[in-house]
Image (spheres, rainbow, N blue to C red):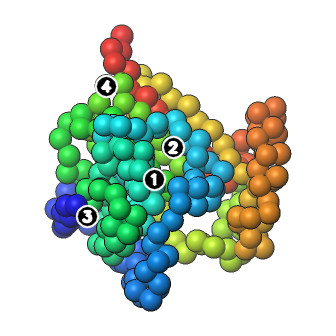
Amino acid sequence: MVVANWAPTGKLNEARLVDEQLHHESQAEIRKKYFQDNPEKLIFRDDDYLNHAPWIRPAIHFLAPGLGQSILDIGCGHGMASIVMARKLAKVSAIDLSPGYIAEATLRAKANQVEIQFFCGNGEELPFADQSFDGIWGNAILHHLELEPAFREIDRILKPGGKAVFCEPWGGNPLVQAIRRWFPYPGKDRSRFETPFQKRHLRLFSRYFSARYRCRIYSYQFLGMVPLIFGREKSGYSWLNRIDYFLLNYLPGLNSLCRYKVIQIEKINNPK
């Protein structure tokens, strides 16, 4: 496992990046004490991660990590997605701005007996060569970044024929925004500069990628987000997500009222 360290270059918004790093470092420090006392909790099954939100399993299925595939996990956080993909025998690299999260993810990879290359770095200035990866994974990362430099980097490092998938919180529903602002729920703590995806972000994404990529966008959690208000995100409410599957397919107007978007892109080998 290799860890490279990020340092401000002055090329981008240094104050924002430092603020993001400090925010996540504070969370990582709290988690560090917990795992020092409970190291066995670092070990998990694939299903523990794949089933924790309804969009995770189909998003990873689209990416199809497998033997020999080079995959980058941008904003790897706790490292669980990286480990799931490494268990499928993909060659996984993972990057995060927080040294504390990289330290936790490194411990988790060791506890789960997989090899992953970890880097402490910035998603807007990726330390990888052009066309390095067959696939790119990002879960709740783009809304932390300046999108245009991030998009340039994604395009630069993805091989022709490669795939990328990003799961992002959606900010198009005023009610959801009010819940995010006023109601307590698991994982609510947010950094100062992050902004849930809006229509303007999707328009920018489309302008940047539509010419040379196949792009698809899926929506998740219309009724399925209701339990969040009561602090009950996981067990016992999968039937709401199943209802959502049919509602969102047959009533497309509801897509703008959902909690999450999953954006899939595939780089065209020979664009005309």
Element at badge 1?
helix
Q: Amino acid at mark 1?
A: Val
Disc 2 and disc 1 in contact, CB within 8 angstroms: yes
In this rendering, the answer to whether 64 lies above or below 197 is: above
Question: Residue at point 36% right, 30% down?
Answer: 162
- Packing grade of label 1 (10 A; few <14, some 14-19, many >=20) is many
On screen, residue 108 versus residue 191, left or right, reads left
Quadrant in which the N terminus is drawn: bottom left
Spatial distance from mark 2 to mark 4, Cα to Cα? 19 Å
- The residue carrying mark 3 is 120
Please name the residue that numbered disc 2 is placed on.
Answer: 60
Mark earlier in primary sequence (1, 3) = 1
The three-letter code of the residue at mark 3 reads Cys
Upstream in sequence: badge 2 or badge 1:
2
Q: At which x and y percent is residue 229?
A: 76, 70
Q: Quadrant of the C terminus?
A: top left
Residue marked by disc 1:
84
> Element under label 4?
strand
